[in-house]
Image (cartoon, grey):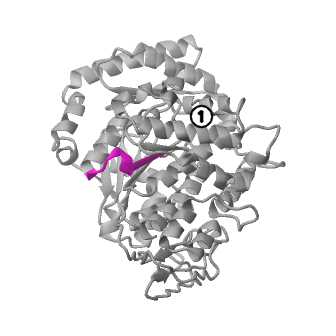
Amino acid sequence: MASAIQTISLKGAAGVAVPARRSAASPGCGLLPRGGVVRLSRGARAVVISAQPEESAGGRNGIDGVVASTSAEQPQAVEATGAEPMGAEATGAEAKGAGGAKEALLATPEPGATPARTAMYMRDLISRQVKANQLSRAGSLSDSTVLRRKGRLKEQDPFIEFVLDLFKTHETEEALDKTEKWLNESMALPVNKRKFSNLYRQVPKLGYYFHPLPLRRALGEYDEFCALTKRRYVRPNFAEVRHIINIAQVHASARDVKLVTFDADGTLYADGKHFEEDNKMIDKIIQLMEIGIHVAIVTAAGYPGDAKRFEGRLQGLLDAFKVQQVSEEVRKRFHVMGGECNYLLEVSENYTLEFVAHAEWREADPEIRDMYWFAHDRAKVDAFLDRAQKFLTDYSEHLMLDVDVMRKEYAVGVLPRNGTVYENLEELSIGAMIELSDAEVPYCAFNGGNDVFVDVGNKNIGLHTMMRYLGFEGSQTLHVGDRFTSTGNDARVRDACSILWVASPDETTFFMRLLYRDVVNMRVL
């Protein structure tokens, strides 16, 4: 399936200029929509930016709320005309100096305080889920269409399951407090000794983490909306714990993030769809690029020599680049890695996609060239794909699946002709992993939701290549995807960089709103 990488880089200057950007609705405007108000209160100690967004929840062209202070001394009071409520952050910033503002960012909101944006964004997310699923009852955080259709198979994660088990014997705050403490203790150890830590002994398949996670802070924000700590009979569920970990990861990554990468289907747009012009992620992507963060889409879709096929999936986004006349500097911060790791594309001056020559990104770096040894041994690649194709077709017949076979330069897959159950696709992908486990060629066998593919290469190679090409580290990179289960093609990314696990495009938008707010605030305050 298609996936996307976004890269974002910010400069931590004492005085930060918020970049201007045109919008389709109001060419020539900056980040604010038509009717927005920018008030710059310049004293000896502060710069205050306030905005009036088009939509109450931080509309498509609105600022999610920025308070910029140029001094560590006491800033002037913030007046946000028509802006979203700043909640505990604004209150803390007014009451204290810039140092106090940093503390306020980390503080748990007081009972009765103005709702923080996290809770506001979450209400907006739930509202979208209720509409998308046509529910006639109260919305649930497990209501994503993807999760409802695929059920338990989409909810597999040893870390989250460990936390859920703690809830059986601990109160919510106590469980997350212990988890945060154990994770911090393990990260204080050298990498080669982390497996001996308390947490890794309890969760051997925990994977690699690049930052300590402020889980207690995330719970405090989440609790404003879900009241987890007040529930007596219903323990937090998988989706709620996943959201809390994601919020903590956003806060942890915001200080250093320079590259944000995205899966495509199920992450940026619905499964089987394309990037339409009304997609709410368009503005979020452009906002991230404008503040210096590189953005990349890392996708399994591969069309050798045919950039138009890639463009077709991202046409709405590319059209927005053109309408808003995104500058060359910003435009060069967008990338597409196709075929898991086999094709790199960037945006041309005409706002179309064009391939980057292999000599520029795959062959120039000796370490990267060694990772792509298979690209110079076509015989081994073809032999591997022949073996994978035979297994997929034979096992499909065994499972009584009527399928079409699709063979590409670096991939082979089966597509059921008639409706089938998700569990059979899961069976196929797990079977392929086991059958090909001794293969010399690096590969990824995954359940795409409507098909099963075996690709030469994987997103781990794609992410490592992208980071080396742009000069970033794993701690500076954040990958957003919806397939982190054992049969998903995002799973291999866990050891390359930090991750956000989402279940729908609406969730992606929610977390990117939080990330943009955190990045701007952290690098200004």
- The residue segment tinted magenta is 470-480
Three-letter code, disc 1: Ile
The residue to which callout 1 is attached is 160
Question: Considering the numbered disc 1 on the image, is that residue within a helix, a strand or a loop?
Answer: helix
Can you give x and y, in whole percent of width and height, for residue 216 in the image? 60, 48
**Residue drawn 38% across the image and 77% down it:** 15
Number of marks drawn: 1
One can see residue 228 in this view:
yes
**Residue drawn 47% across the image and 75% down it:** 68
Left or right of residue 440, residue 223 in this image:
right
Near-viewer residue (224 or 197): 197
**Residue drawn 23% across the image and 28% down it:** 374
Left or right of residue 222, residue 357 in this image:
left
Classify 258 as above or below 228: below
Left or right of residue 224, residue 58 in this image:
left
**Residue drawn 62% across the image and 83% down it:** 81
Near-viewer residue (525 or 420): 525
Image quarter of residue 339: top left
Crowding at mark 1 (Cα within 10 Å: few <14, some 14-19, many 20+): many
Can you give x and y, in whole percent of width and height, for residue 57 in the image? 65, 67
Classify 57 as above or below 314: below
Can you give x and y, in whole percent of width and height, for residue 56 in the image? 67, 71
Image quarter of residue 52: bottom right
Can residue 479 be found in the magenta stretch?
yes
Can residue 203 be found in the magenta stretch?
no
Near-viewer residue (364 or 96): 96
Near-viewer residue (184 or 421): 184
Can you give x and y, in whole percent of width and height, for residue 514 in the image? 55, 59
One can see residue 420 in this view:
no
Classify 490 as above or below 437: below
